[in-house]
């Protein structure tokens, strides 16, 4: 079963549960009317038509806490610092000047978006999924990912955003996550707390202790601790990357904000994210690797640009 099928089934189940709650409310009201249990109408109140009358019973909506946390992680205001990086877009555009005849910056952006999502899917998603499946391996996964990243600029960006997510976890998510979820979530929360503590100790230690804090494995563990499922964690990681690149394109004057929303809402992007996730779904971290070699060159040469608006 594909991830899209699972989401459609969840939506259908949610709709059926709402219909069931409504039907139960109607049944209780009908039974109360038949045995005369409804209170008398207050003559001082204006009459309410049959079609506009509200039910006098609570209705429980099938919205879990994980949905709330999913919205928080997908928020563009999540302070990860992604807005400060262009993920290589600025360098990519600079290395494609002058434009070929008939070419536009918008067409270059669409090409880059496709390449960068495929690159992130093959280099980072296996580590995020592995951390979700086994949060106790967080330290080992972080170390392996650090060893596999060849580009210094990409490594700095991954560590900066990963440590920012750790800070968000400690200051915003930790307390609620420990009180809301299952044993798996508590195991993930404990792993994250241990990792964060070891990172602080390593920073103060006089001996060289290498703990990095890359984004992908921390994302997987935090997603598990917040109650997301594996499909949501992987899809949201790629979608957030697409949002960050699109936001960078807006600030680089490649497109306007309305066009950016059109790109994010398009079926093309949805299929690209879904297909990229499906291709690496069973890929173990040891088989992860860069499938777009030029991406490391574009990202790495960003700090060599004469002028730039994004961090390196």
Image (cartoon, rainbow, N blue to C red):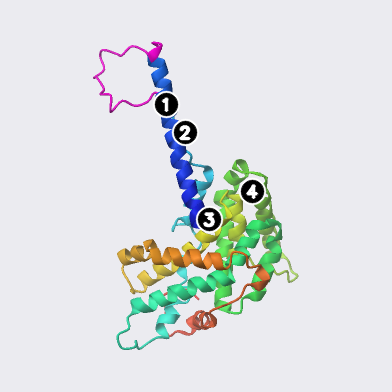
On whether residue 303 falls in the magenta region, the answer is: no
Mark 2 to mark 4 CA distance (whole Å): 24 Å
Label 3 CA crowd tier, 10 Å (few <14, some 14–19, many 20+): some
Residue 266 appearing in the image? yes
Q: Marks 4 and 3: in contact by CB < 8 Å?
A: no
Q: Marks 1 and 2: in contact by CB < 8 Å?
A: no
On whether residue 35 falls in the magenta region, the answer is: yes
Residue 214 appearing in the image? no
Mark 1 to mark 3 CA distance (whole Å): 33 Å
* Mark 2, residue position: 60
Nearest to viewer (mark 3 / mark 4) = 3
Dot 3 lies on which element? helix
Estimate the x, y position of residue 7 in percent, counting from the top left: 49, 52
* Mark 4, residue position: 185
* Mark 3, residue position: 232
* Along the viewing direction, whichever of 264 and 283 lies nearer the viewer: 283
Dot 1 lies on which element? helix
Nearest to viewer (mark 1 / mark 3) = 1
Q: Write the start and end of the magenta stretch as one range.
A: 34-57
N-terminal of the pair, mark 2 or mark 3, is 2
Dot 2 lies on which element? loop
N-terminal of the pair, mark 4 or mark 1, is 1
Label 2 CA crowd tier, 10 Å (few <14, some 14–19, many 20+): few
């Amino acid at each position: 079963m594909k991830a899209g099928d699972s989401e459609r089934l969840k939506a259908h189940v949610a709709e059926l549960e709402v219909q069931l709650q409504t039907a139960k409310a109607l049944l209780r009201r009908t039974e109360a009317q038949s045995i005369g249990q409804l209170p008398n109408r207050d003559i001082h109140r204006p009459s309410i038509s049959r079609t506009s009358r509200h039910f006098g019973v609570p209705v429980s909506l099938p919205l879990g806490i994980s949905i709330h946390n999913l919205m928080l992680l997908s928020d563009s205001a999540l302070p990860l610092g992604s807005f400060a990086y262009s993920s290589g877009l600025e360098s990519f555009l600079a290395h494609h000047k002058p434009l070929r005849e008939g070419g536009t910056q918008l067409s270059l952006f669409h090409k880059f978006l496709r390449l960068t999502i495929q690159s992130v899917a093959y280099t980072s998603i296996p580590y995020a999924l592995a951390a979700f499946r086994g949060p106790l391996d967080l330290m080992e996964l972080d170390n392996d990912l650090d060893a596999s990243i060849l580009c210094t600029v990409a490594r700095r960006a991954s560590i900066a955003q990963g440590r920012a997510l750790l800070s968000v976890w400690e200051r915003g998510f930790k307390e609620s996550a420990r009180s809301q979820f299952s044993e798996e979530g508590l195991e993930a929360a404990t792993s994250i707390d241990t990792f964060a503590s070891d990172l602080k100790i390593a920073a103060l230690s006089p001996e060289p202790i290498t703990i990095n804090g890359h984004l992908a494995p921390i994302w997987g563990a935090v997603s598990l601790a917040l109650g997301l499922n594996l499909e949501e964690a992987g899809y949201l990681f790629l979608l957030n990357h697409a949002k960050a690149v699109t936001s960078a394109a807006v600030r680089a004057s490649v497109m306007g904000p309305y066009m950016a929303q059109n790109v994010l809402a398009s079926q093309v992007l949805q299929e690209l994210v879904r297909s990229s996730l499906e291709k690496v779904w069973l890929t173990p971290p040891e088989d992860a690797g860069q499938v777009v070699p030029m991406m490391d060159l574009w990202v790495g040469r960003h700090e060599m640009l004469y002028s730039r608006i994004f961090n390196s």
